[in-house]
Image (cartoon, rainbow, N blue to C red):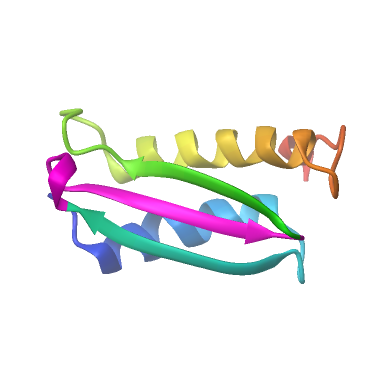
Protein backbone atom coordinates (compact mmCIF):
# COMPACT_ATOMS: atom_id res chain seq x y z
CA UNK A 1 0.00 0.00 0.00
CA UNK A 2 1.49 3.34 -1.06
CA UNK A 3 1.58 6.25 1.38
CA UNK A 4 -0.52 9.27 0.35
CA UNK A 5 2.49 11.59 0.47
CA UNK A 6 4.30 9.31 -1.95
CA UNK A 7 1.28 9.13 -4.28
CA UNK A 8 1.00 12.92 -4.37
CA UNK A 9 4.71 13.68 -4.79
CA UNK A 10 5.70 10.83 -7.10
CA UNK A 11 2.55 10.28 -9.19
CA UNK A 12 -0.03 13.08 -9.04
CA UNK A 13 2.10 16.23 -9.07
CA UNK A 14 4.46 15.13 -11.89
CA UNK A 15 1.51 14.05 -14.08
CA UNK A 16 -0.31 17.33 -13.45
CA UNK A 17 2.83 19.37 -14.21
CA UNK A 18 3.31 17.47 -17.47
CA UNK A 19 -0.20 18.20 -18.72
CA UNK A 20 -1.67 21.37 -17.26
CA UNK A 21 -0.49 24.92 -17.84
CA UNK A 22 -0.25 27.41 -15.00
CA UNK A 23 -3.62 28.62 -13.78
CA UNK A 24 -5.73 25.79 -15.23
CA UNK A 25 -6.05 23.70 -12.08
CA UNK A 26 -8.40 25.26 -9.55
CA UNK A 27 -8.38 22.47 -6.96
CA UNK A 28 -7.42 18.87 -6.43
CA UNK A 29 -7.77 16.36 -3.62
CA UNK A 30 -6.36 12.94 -2.94
CA UNK A 31 -7.76 10.48 -0.42
CA UNK A 32 -7.34 6.88 0.53
CA UNK A 33 -10.33 4.77 -0.32
CA UNK A 34 -10.12 1.96 2.24
CA UNK A 35 -13.40 0.45 1.11
CA UNK A 36 -11.62 -0.27 -2.18
CA UNK A 37 -8.64 -2.24 -0.83
CA UNK A 38 -6.45 0.79 -0.14
CA UNK A 39 -6.91 2.46 -3.49
CA UNK A 40 -6.17 6.18 -3.77
CA UNK A 41 -8.80 8.45 -5.29
CA UNK A 42 -7.97 11.70 -7.10
CA UNK A 43 -10.22 14.56 -8.11
CA UNK A 44 -9.00 17.54 -10.16
CA UNK A 45 -11.04 20.61 -11.06
CA UNK A 46 -9.61 22.53 -14.00
CA UNK A 47 -11.37 25.48 -15.58
CA UNK A 48 -14.69 24.32 -14.10
CA UNK A 49 -14.42 20.72 -15.32
CA UNK A 50 -13.78 17.75 -13.06
CA UNK A 51 -11.60 14.68 -13.56
CA UNK A 52 -11.96 11.79 -11.08
CA UNK A 53 -9.99 8.59 -11.02
CA UNK A 54 -8.57 5.88 -8.75
CA UNK A 55 -4.98 6.95 -9.33
CA UNK A 56 -3.63 3.90 -7.48
CA UNK A 57 -5.78 0.80 -7.48
CA UNK A 58 -5.08 -1.39 -4.48
CA UNK A 59 -6.32 -4.55 -6.18
CA UNK A 60 -3.81 -4.28 -9.06
CA UNK A 61 -0.51 -5.91 -8.05
CA UNK A 62 3.02 -5.30 -9.29
CA UNK A 63 2.67 -1.74 -10.60
CA UNK A 64 5.32 0.83 -9.82
CA UNK A 65 4.86 4.53 -9.11
CA UNK A 66 6.21 5.16 -12.61
CA UNK A 67 3.52 2.88 -14.09
CA UNK A 68 0.75 4.65 -12.17
CA UNK A 69 2.19 8.06 -13.07
CA UNK A 70 2.33 7.33 -16.78
CA UNK A 71 -1.20 5.96 -16.71
CA UNK A 72 -2.45 9.12 -14.97
CA UNK A 73 -0.53 11.43 -17.31
CA UNK A 74 -2.03 9.69 -20.35
CA UNK A 75 -5.56 9.95 -18.94
CA UNK A 76 -5.05 13.65 -18.14
CA UNK A 77 -3.92 14.28 -21.74
CA UNK A 78 -7.21 12.74 -22.91
CA UNK A 79 -9.19 14.74 -20.33
CA UNK A 80 -7.73 18.04 -21.55
CA UNK A 81 -8.23 17.14 -25.22
CA UNK A 82 -11.91 16.44 -24.54
CA UNK A 83 -12.49 19.44 -22.25
CA UNK A 84 -14.01 22.79 -23.20
CA UNK A 85 -10.84 24.65 -22.20
CA UNK A 86 -8.43 22.40 -24.09
CA UNK A 87 -10.58 20.91 -26.82
CA UNK A 88 -8.44 19.11 -29.40
CA UNK A 89 -5.11 20.05 -27.85
CA UNK A 90 -2.42 17.38 -27.75
CA UNK A 91 -0.66 17.97 -24.44
CA UNK A 92 1.44 14.85 -25.09
CA UNK A 93 3.88 16.94 -27.11
CA UNK A 94 4.49 19.72 -24.54
Quadrant in which residue 7 is drawn: bottom left
Residue 32 included in the magenta stretch of the image = no
Position of 26 compared to 28: left or right?
right
Residue at 28%, 50% in the rendered image: 40
**Residue 54 placed where, x, y %?**
36, 42
Position of 30 compared to 71: left or right?
left
Residue at 67%, 32% in the rendered image: 78
**Residue 12 placed where, x, y %?**
45, 56
* Between 70 and 82, the one nearer to me in the picture: 82
**Residue 45 placed where, x, y %?**
62, 60
Residue 39 included in the magenta stretch of the image = yes
What segment carries the magenta color? 34-47
* Between 62 and 60, the one nearer to me in the picture: 60
**Label tally:** 0
Residue at 58%, 69% in the rendered image: 27
**Residue 50 placed where, x, y %?**
62, 51
Position of 17 compared to 1: left or right?
right
Q: Is residue 53 above or below residue 47?
A: above
* Between 62 and 43, the one nearer to me in the picture: 43
Residue at 86%, 37% in the rendered image: 87
Amino acid sequence: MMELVHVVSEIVVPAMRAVFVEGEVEAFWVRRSDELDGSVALSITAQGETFEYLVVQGTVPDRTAEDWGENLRSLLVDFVAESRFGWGQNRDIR
